[in-house]
Amino acid sequence: MNNLVHATELRYSKDSKALTVAFDDGTRFELPAEYMRVYSPSAEVRGHGADERKILAGRRHVGIMKIEPVGNYAVQIHFDDLHDTGLFSWAYLHELGTKYDAWWAQYLKDLDARGLSRDP
């Protein structure tokens, strides 16, 4: 994870329900709201220990209502399912982007293994 990156652009599209994030290292990612919600850095999702990550089902249609800056290092995202805890640091947003393919595949595998769905 790169702790030295800083976001240079944040743009949310209500139509695609995705957040575009550009960084000062030249990378740019389009992060679906659903992906960001199920990988929220909050204790609700991450748990309080290494093996406590929770698998959230039924978030296919989740969107973002508001994005608030937190200092010069993070944003707090308010999702339309009323989840708003957990700070998305620039480093974590960058990590979400660089690991998207692997993490999304793992999420889908975890849902399937538990007989859960992305649909509400």
Image (cartoon, rainbow, N blue to C red):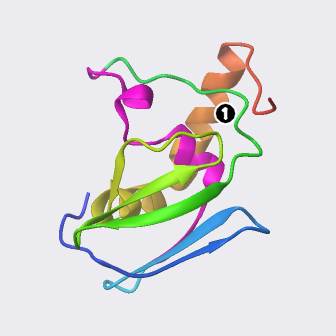
Q: Classify the position of the C terminus by image quarter.
A: top right
Q: Residues within 10 Å of mark 1 (few under 14, many from 20)?
A: some
61 relative to 70, above or below: above
86 relative to 112, above or below: below
Q: Classify the position of the N terminus by image quarter.
A: bottom left
Q: Residue at x 79, y 69 (%)?
A: 15
Does residue 7 belong to the magenta stretch? no
9 relative to 15, above or below: below
The residue under label 1 is which amino acid type? Leu
Q: Residue furthest left?
A: 4
Residue 31 percent coordinates (x, y)? 58, 62
The answer to whether 68 appears left or right of 78 in the picture is: left
Look at mark 1 in the image and give the residue it sits on. 108
Q: Is residue 82 visible?
A: yes
Residue 82 percent coordinates (x, y)? 58, 40
The answer to whether 96 appears left or right of 69 in the picture is: right
Name the quadrant containing residue 76.
bottom left
Does residue 43 belong to the magenta stretch? yes
The region drawn magenta spans 28-50
Residue 38 percent coordinates (x, y)? 55, 38
In front: 2, or 31? 31
Asked which secondary structure carries label 1, the reply is helix
Q: Residue at x 71, y 61 (%)?
A: 17
Q: Is residue 99 visible?
A: no
